[in-house]
């Protein structure tokens, strides 16, 4: 008799543990969906804020404007900045170009020209056609590699009428921004 009671007790204990496990799993999945939903809301708000900021800069008469000039991030993180372009000339096709930049170490002792940051930066380089007085807002995605050196990366964004970009084909002012990797 004792073995039957022990077997039933063990079965009941296992059943209770399984039920508790299922409840905790369900709560964890629900919490995960809340976090993901909240992150999507924050992302869309930031995108709207960036678009409004770029719209304000373009309305001030700037032909090329960046949403920010400093991006602070950690290795492995992704950030998005915006660029706004206002065409004040006849209809034309324009191209974005972000050449390799300059690296300055955290302690300021080392400066390297032409750092290989092209694989970090994702943007539309296929070109876009703009009519007179038409504006465009584009995203520039920055993904810092996990093995990137800490410090500052100074990059330039050029808008040009031709590819590859030359000084003569440049449209508007060169926009500089800094990535602070810490």
Image: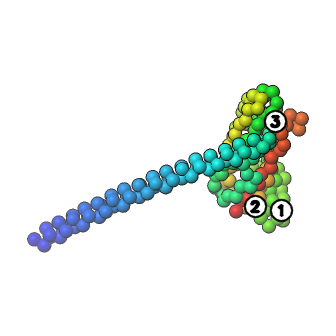
**Which residue sits at x=13%, y=73%?**
2
Which mark is on residue 151?
2
Write down the residue under mark 1: 110
Q: Quadrant of residue 167?
A: top right
> What residue sits right under mark 3 in the picture?
160
Q: Residues within 10 Å of mark 3 (few under 14, many from 20)?
A: many
Instruction: Please provide percent x and percent y for residue 152.
Output: 77, 58
Measure the C-alpha gap from mark 1 to mark 3: 31 Å
The answer to whether 121 appears left or right of 174 in the picture is left
Numbered-mark total = 3
* Residue 145 quadrant: bottom right
Comparing marks 2 and 1, which lies closer to the viewer? 2
Asked if disc 2 and disc 1 are in contact, CB closer than 8 Å, the reply is yes
x 74%, y 55%: residue: 70
Seen from the viewer's position, the closer of residues 42 and 32 is 42
Where the C terminus falls, by quadrant?
A: bottom right
Residue 123: give x, y in percent of width and height.
Answer: 70, 41
């Amino acid at each position: 008799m004792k073995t039957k009671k022990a077997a039933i007790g063990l079965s009941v204990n296992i059943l209770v543990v399984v039920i508790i496990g299922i409840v905790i799993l369900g709560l964890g999945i629900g919490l995960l969906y809340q976090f993901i939903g909240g992150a999507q809301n924050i992302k869309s708000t930031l995108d709207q804020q960036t678009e409004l900021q770029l719209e304000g800069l373009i309305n001030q008469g700037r032909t090329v404007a960046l949403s920010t000039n400093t991006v602070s991030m950690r290795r492995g993180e992704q950030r998005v900045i915006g660029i706004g372009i206002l065409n004040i000339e006849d209809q034309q096709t324009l191209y974005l170009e972000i050449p390799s930049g300059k690296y300055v170490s955290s302690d300021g002792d080392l400066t390297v020209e032409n750092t290989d940051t092209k694989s970090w930066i994702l943007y539309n380089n296929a070109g876009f056609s703009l009519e007179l007085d038409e504006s465009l807002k584009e995203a520039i995605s920055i993904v810092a590699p996990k093995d990137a050196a800490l410090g500052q990366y100074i990059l330039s964004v050029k808008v040009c009428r031709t590819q590859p970009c030359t000084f003569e084909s440049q449209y508007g002012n060169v926009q500089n921004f800094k990535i602070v990797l810490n």
